[in-house]
Image (cartoon, rainbow, N blue to C red):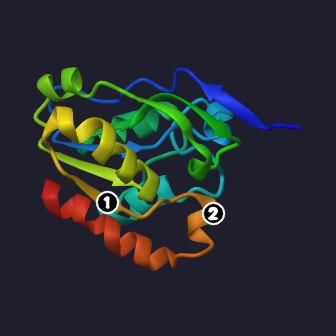
Amino acid sequence: MDSSRKVTQGFGPIYDRESRILILGTTPSVASVKQGFYYGHSRNVFWRVLAEIFDESIGQSKEEKIAFLHRRHIALWDVLASCDIKGSSDSSIKEPVANDLRPLLSETKINIVFTTGKKATKLYEKLCFPLTGIEAISLPSTSPANVANFCYEDIVRHYRIIKEVLD
């Protein structure tokens, strides 16, 4: 049985006019789609890492997470608008189509882009950078697959750059 799925629409971007940085994942995971929001897998440490680097509680609800992002001037989206993918494996992505980041960038104060994971970085560099002209800063993936191979404290250390940029 082929477990591939066509992702045709991820989540829309989270931002406001005061957003100063953009964090881009690749595409929503199966667990995130089920949860209805970014980084929804119970073992994905994205929200935990952000809470730690900013030393504040984010909360569990979608609304609390959005409020945190706005408070910290962080925009959140995915590199891809659509693709074919097996399960949640970024390495299986085929037929990638990028989100057009230009409208979001023109409506905000964003001048720094972070990508979460090697595949998001590679796809951003190939599909988005030629249009945005903003080089991405690559951060490690916070997915359960990567956390198994990467020390949590090291992930936090890498993500501290976000707070440094915003302070």
The answer to whether residue 97 is above or below residue 40 is: above
Image quadrant where residue 130 sits: top left
Q: Residues within 10 Å of mark 1 (few under 14, many from 20)?
A: many
Determine the residue positioned at 28% across, 29% down.
Answer: 15
- The picture places residue 88, in percent across and down from the top left corner, at 65, 45
Q: What's the amino acid at mark 1?
A: Ser
Whether residue 2 is visible to the viewer of this picture, yes or no, is yes
| Left or right: 74 as drawn, with respect to 28 | left
In the rendered image, which quarter is residue 74 located in?
top left
First reached walking from the N terminus: tag 1 or tag 2 = 1
Q: Secondary structure at mark 2?
A: helix
Q: Quadrant of residue 139?
A: bottom left
What residue sits 42% from the left and 71% below the top?
155
Question: Which of the labelled discs sits on residue 145, or is there none?
Answer: 2
**x, y percent for residue 151:** 51, 79
Q: Which mark is residue 138?
A: 1
Quadrant, the C terminus: bottom left
Amino acid bearing label 2: Ala
